[in-house]
Amino acid sequence: MKLIIKAIKVVSDILDIICRKLCLVIGIVLVVDLFLGVFTRFVLGNQLSFTEELARFCMLWFAFIGGSVEVKKNNLITFTFVIDRLKPTPKKIMEIVDICLVIVFLAVFMYFGTDAMKIFGFGKASVTRINLAWTAMGMYAGTAIMLVHMVYILLTKVTGYTPEPVKE
């Protein structure tokens, strides 16, 4: 079991590094795009047609990929005011139940995300003509990465084993 946990940790850590860098790139693109949209609309008096659409796509990807970064840090919304007041054994059980519920939610979201990918695959964005499956892929990828992080968190919580951090 320790080997499985270590392997999932490695995958989770690699995905987290990729997601952090991707969020940085998406954030830069989003800021430049929004600045360009505001500049062309209010200074030049003629807005570029693609800036609003590109901003929507970036926000969707940013939300889900950024969400996976926060899941990695275990920054989920929980009922801590209830769980923190419990004794150690019921507290651990409730934390595990909480993690399992999040995993179920993410799995259901992934299931319907697959359907969304199929539906969006037929459409194209009105201005940029980008296939809408690319926008759905942001939701799908972010959710899949969140699932990997949550499985790692669940296994460490259930077994009590946390692998040593890799020394740099």
Image (cartoon, helix red, strand yellow):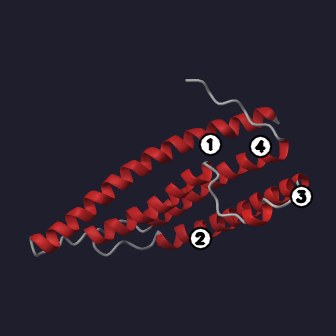
The crowd level at tag 2 (other Cα within 10 Å; few <14, some 14-19, many 20+) is few
Q: Which mark is residue 54?
A: none
For mark 1, give the secondary structure.
helix
Q: Spatial distance from mark 1 to mark 3, Cα to Cα?
A: 28 Å
Most foreground residue, 138 or 168 = 168
User: Which amino acid, mark 1?
Assistant: Ser
| Front label number (1 vs 2) | 1
For mark 2, give the secondary structure.
helix
Sequence order check: which comes first, mark 4 or mark 2? 2
Which residue, given by chain and number where applicable, does mark 1 sit on? 12
Residue at point 81% right, 56% down?
A: 96
The crowd level at tag 3 (other Cα within 10 Å; few <14, some 14-19, many 20+) is few
Which residue, given by chain and number where applicable, does mark 2 sit on? 115
Sequence order check: which comes first, mark 1 or mark 2? 1
The crowd level at tag 1 (other Cα within 10 Å; few <14, some 14-19, many 20+) is many
Q: Spatial distance from mark 4 to mark 2, Cα to Cα?
A: 32 Å
User: Which amino acid, mark 3?
Assistant: Pro
Q: Spatial distance from mark 3 to mark 2, Cα to Cα?
A: 38 Å
Residue at point 77% right, 43% down?
A: 156
Sequence order check: which comes first, mark 1 or mark 4? 1
Residue 68 on image: x %, y % = 56, 54
Q: Spatial distance from mark 4 to mark 3, Cα to Cα?
A: 17 Å
Q: Quadrant of residue 108?
A: bottom right
| Front label number (1 vs 4) | 4
Which residue, given by chain and number where applicable, does mark 4 sit on? 156
User: Which amino acid, mark 2?
Assistant: Asp
Horizontal side of 57 relative to 155 (left or right) equals left
Residue 125 on image: x %, y % = 35, 72
Which residue, given by chain and number where applicable, does mark 3 sit on? 90
Vertical order, 138 against 163 (above or below): below
